[in-house]
Image (cartoon, rainbow, N blue to C red):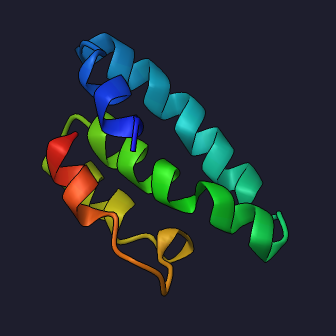
Amino acid sequence: RDVPALVLRLDRAGRRSALAGLKELRKEARGWEWQRQDKIRKALLVAGAGCNTGAAGCATWIGGRDLRSWSRSPYPLILVA
């Protein structure tokens, strides 16, 4: 729940910088066991969507298969970020 507030504090350059780290974390997390991935999935989805500076990048991030889950949707949080 704190992720949108953290993203909103970043300027454009800060979002770009954070996105680079989020991409690395996303790659790393693909190799984790399911339970560990599940702990960060929503936060990673919201943070990445908020840090992408373009619509196409944001849509690609949101549509990523590795960021989907069967639990409650985090999309209301994305709209805040």
Residue 23 in the image, given as x and y percentages of width and height: 56, 43
Assign the C terminus to one quadrant of the image. Answer: top left
In the image, 20: left or right of 62?
A: right
Report the residue that reaches farthest toward the front.
1
Report the residue that reaches farthest toward the bottom.
70
Q: Is residue 50 above or below residue 71?
A: above
Q: Residue at x 24, y 17 (%)?
A: 12
Q: Is residue 71 above or below residue 47?
A: below
Residue 65 in the image, given as x and y percentages of width and height: 49, 77
Q: Is residue 8 above or below residue 74?
A: above
Closer to the camera in the image, 13 or 79:
79
Q: Residue at x 39, y 44 (%)?
A: 1
Q: Residue at x 37, y 25 (%)?
A: 6
Residue 32 in the image, given as x and y percentages of width and height: 83, 63
Q: Is residue 13 above or below residue 37?
A: above
In the image, 64: left or right of 39?
A: left
Residue 22 in the image, given as x and y percentages of width and height: 55, 38
Please identify the quarter of the rendering in which residue 63 is found: bottom left
In the image, 17: left or right of 50?
A: right
